[in-house]
Image (tube, grey):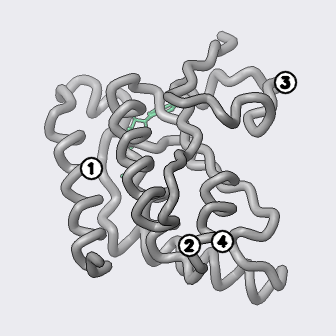
Amino acid sequence: MRTDAEKSAEQQRISLEYQTSTNRRRQQHHGVVVTPTEVTDFIIQSLIHQLKTERGRDPDQGIEWLDPFGGTGIFTARLLQIAPLSPDRKRELAENCIVIEIDPDAAQVCFENLIRVHREETGHEGFVRVLCADTFALDPQYDLWADHYGHPGVIHLPTKH
Ligand SMILES: C[S@@+](CC[C@H](N)C(=O)[O-])C[C@H]1O[C@@H](n2cnc3c(N)ncnc32)[C@H](O)[C@@H]1O
């Protein structure tokens, strides 16, 4: 079993590899800057604490998690890794997560990254829904949580400009 420090370092490495492989123009245009895991973990832990104290809920209890600028999935990976839940409850949590990423290559890396995290954290094969789309141009009529669960790969969404 890996330590959390090892898991955290791996997420940071995957994200930084993506950032350094992205050309400078797109880095600036799309703001490709990785969030350090110290920061992702602080945000996630604060959210989990707030959910519990203000709503009396755990993160797998009817919460929809959406990362609209997902990169390689560092936020969702860390959520699954540090949420204080049993493996079975983490499966439920993973079903309620969606990551959106505009770059098809990053979306693919994200999808594969989250498959590995899902396997390690839940003990089962599964995945997190990853949508390749421009978050700002999503059709507001489109229900992100409908339809697509069960699709084995990145979902490329049409966007409305
Ligand atoms: C600041 S990085 C953050 C990546 C990751 N969430 C993190 O915290 O390290 C922003 C990411 O959002 C993506 N992005 C930028 N504009 C976007 C848009 N309009 N729709 C979806 N993704 C977008 C970029 O390609 C990039 O991977």
Confirm or deny contact between disc 2 and disc 4 (CB under 8 A). Answer: yes
Q: Secondary structure at mark 2?
A: helix
Q: Quadrant of residue 61?
A: bottom right
Q: Which residue is depicted at the point 25% across and 78% down? A: 5
Name which of mark 3 and mark 2 comes first in the sequence. 2
Where residue 57 sits in the image (x, y, percent)? 79, 79
Task: Establish if 161 lies above or below 28.
Answer: above
What quarter of the picture does the C terminus occupy? top right
Q: Secondary structure at mark 1?
A: helix
Q: Which residue is mark 2?
A: 87
Q: How many marks?
A: 4
Q: CA distance from mark 3 to mark 1?
A: 31 Å
Q: Which residue is mark 3?
A: 141
Where residue 44 sits in the image (x, y, percent)? 53, 72
Q: Which residue is depicted at the point 39% across and 25% down? A: 103
Q: Secondary structure at mark 4?
A: helix
The amino acid marked with disc number 1 is: Ser
Q: Is residue 84 left or right of residue 150?
A: left
Q: Which residue is mark 4?
A: 89
Q: Is residue 148 left or right of residue 113?
A: right
- Please name whichever residue, 144 or 113, is drawn nearer the observer in this view of the structure: 113
What quarter of the picture does the N terminus occupy? bottom left
Task: Establish if 54 lies above or below 110.
Answer: below
- Within 8 Å of ligand 1, the CB of disc 3? no
Packing grade of label 4 (10 A; few <14, some 14-19, many >=20) is some
Q: Which residue is depicted at the point 50% across and 28% down? A: 154
Q: Which residue is mark 1?
A: 15
Quadrant in which ligand 1 is drawn? top left
Q: CA distance from mark 2 to mark 1?
A: 25 Å
Task: Establish if 27 lies above or below 157.
Answer: below
Q: Quadrant of residue 112?
A: top left
